[in-house]
Amino acid sequence: MIEMTINQLATIMGGTV
């Protein structure tokens, strides 16, 4: 479950940056 949150944040952050 934690992995999902990290993955989502990484995707949003990676996409934004």
Image: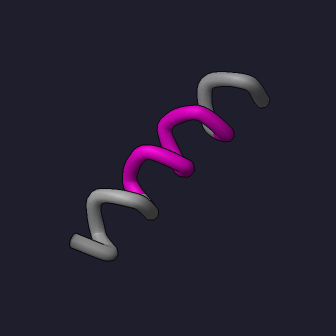
Q: Where 11 falls versus 2 (above or below)?
A: above
Horizontal side of residue 8 vs 17, given as left or right? left
Q: Looking at this rendering, what residue extends furthest in the bottom direction?
A: 2
The outermost residue toward the left is 1
Q: Is residue 5 left or right of residue 1?
A: right
Counting from the top left corner in percent of width and height, residue 16 is at: 73, 24
Look at the image and say whether residue 8 sits in the magenta stretch. yes
Expressed as whole percent of the image width and height from the top left, the position of residue 2 reads 32, 75
Q: Coloring scheme of the render?
A: one colour
| Range shown magenta | 7-13
Q: State the image coordinates of residue 17 (x, y, percent, origin top left).
A: 78, 30
Left or right: 9 with respect to 13?
left
Residue with the most extreme front position: 1
Residue at 49% x, 37% y is 11
Q: How many marks?
A: 0
Q: Quadrant of residue 4?
A: bottom left
Q: Image quarter for residue 3?
A: bottom left
Q: Residue at x 38, y 53 (%)?
A: 7
Look at the picture and state if 7 lies above or below 2. Answer: above
* Nearer to the camera, 1 or 10: 1
Furthest residue toward right: 17
Majority SS type along the magenta span = helix
Give left or right: position of 10 versus 7: right
Vertical arrangement, residue 11 with respect to residue 7, above or below: above
**Quarter in which the N terminus is drawn:** bottom left
Task: Tell me the residue at 53%/49% (across/down).
Answer: 10
